[in-house]
């Protein structure tokens, strides 16, 4: 199957700083990527759809000025958590579309801890 | 409004036996359904899918059954292996062919040796 990578795999930052997470499709091009977050023992919650060459579309309740998404190429989308707070601590996962019945290929996730 | 629901948060089975994971949905317009497997601190991996026009899809030890009248699907794993221990999510596509997925809450499967 297709491979999606994320970097970093984990990051610890101080409150008020910004953190950038990269999502790359390694062996295919993705015009659309998706960003999810997962709290402990909860489901994956879709945050936004990253569209190559255009603005991201955010789900209801997600602050677009706080979670900046840039999809500058067909293989790279970035999520920047700006002015991070402890409540932003979570597991962030990206995905990109695959073949067949619309299955998504997910990155390994990034564990963000804000102190 | 939780359109995809997994009402059992956890399931424990003995190695070699059958594992049955259940999922219910509310939107009869879903075109297909997917099952994902997730280990801790990793992204989900695609397992198996089923089109809404079918009632069964089988891939090795994994079989998904779809009961449209009951708006219910289930994932059967047989025989279960300790390496199957993970969180299993069922998912369905958002309307509008956007590629977005709606996930259930997940069921943690533990297969005991």
Image: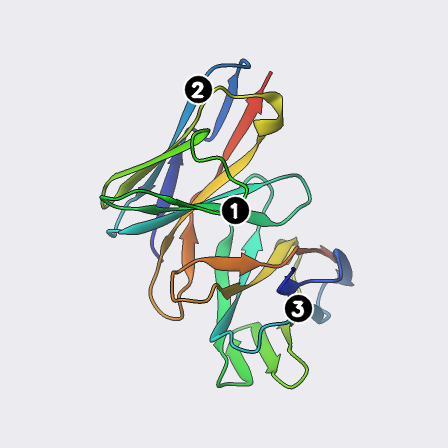
The part of the image, by quadrant, that contains residue A79 is top left
How far apart are the alpha carbons under marks 3 and 1? 25 Å
Q: Which residue is mark 1?
A: A60
Residue occupying image coordinates x 47% and y 15%: A17
Q: What is the crowding at mark 1: few (fewer than 14 residues within 10 Å), some, or many (at least 20)?
A: few
At which x and y percent is residue A41? 69, 44
Give the distance between the C-alpha atoms of the residues marked 2 and 3, in whole angstroms: 38 Å
A64 on left or right of A42? left
- Left or right of residue A3: residue A81: right
Q: Nearer the viewer, mark 3 or mark 1?
A: 1
Structural crowding at the residue carrying mark 3, measured as other residues with C-alpha within 10 Å and reported as few (<14), some (14–19) or many (≥20) = many
Mark 3: which secondary structure? strand
Q: Position of residue B84 (x, y in %)?
A: 62, 58
Helix or strand or loop: what does disc 1 sit on?
loop
- Which numbered marker is on residue B23? 3
Measure the alpha-carbon separation of dots 1 and 2: 22 Å
Quarter of image, res A75: top left
The answer to whether residue B87 is above or below residue A79 is below
- The chain carrying label 1 is A
Q: Do badges 3 and 1 share one subunit? A: no
State the mark number for residue A18.
2
């Amino acid at each position: 199957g297709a491979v999606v990578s994320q970097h970093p795999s984990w990051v610890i930052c101080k409150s008020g700083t910004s953190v950038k997470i990269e999502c790359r499709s390694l062996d295919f091009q993705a015009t659309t990527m998706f960003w999810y977050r997962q709290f402990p023992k909860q489901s994956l919650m879709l945050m936004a759809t990253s569209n190559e060459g255009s603005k991201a579309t955010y789900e209801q309740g997600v602050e677009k000025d706080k979670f900046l998404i840039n999809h500058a190429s067909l293989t790279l989308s970035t999520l920047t958590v700006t002015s991070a707070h402890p409540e932003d601590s979570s597991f962030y996962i990206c995905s990109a579309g695959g073949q067949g019945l619309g299955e998504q290929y997910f990155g390994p996730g990034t564990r963000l801890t804000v102190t | 409004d939780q359109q995809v629901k997994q009402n059992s948060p956890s399931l424990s089975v003995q190695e070699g036996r059958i594992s049955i994971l259940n999922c219910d949905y509310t939107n009869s317009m879903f075109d297909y359904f997917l099952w994902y497997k997730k280990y801790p601190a990793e992204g989900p991996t695609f397992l198996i899918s089923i089109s809404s026009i079918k009632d069964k899809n089988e891939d090795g030890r994994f079989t998904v059954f779809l009961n449209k009248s009951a708006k219910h699907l289930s994932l059967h794993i047989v025989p279960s292996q300790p390496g199957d221990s993970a969180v299993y999510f069922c998912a369905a596509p958002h309307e509008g062919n956007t590629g977005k997925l709606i996930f259930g809450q997940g069921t943690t499967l533990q297969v005991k040796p």
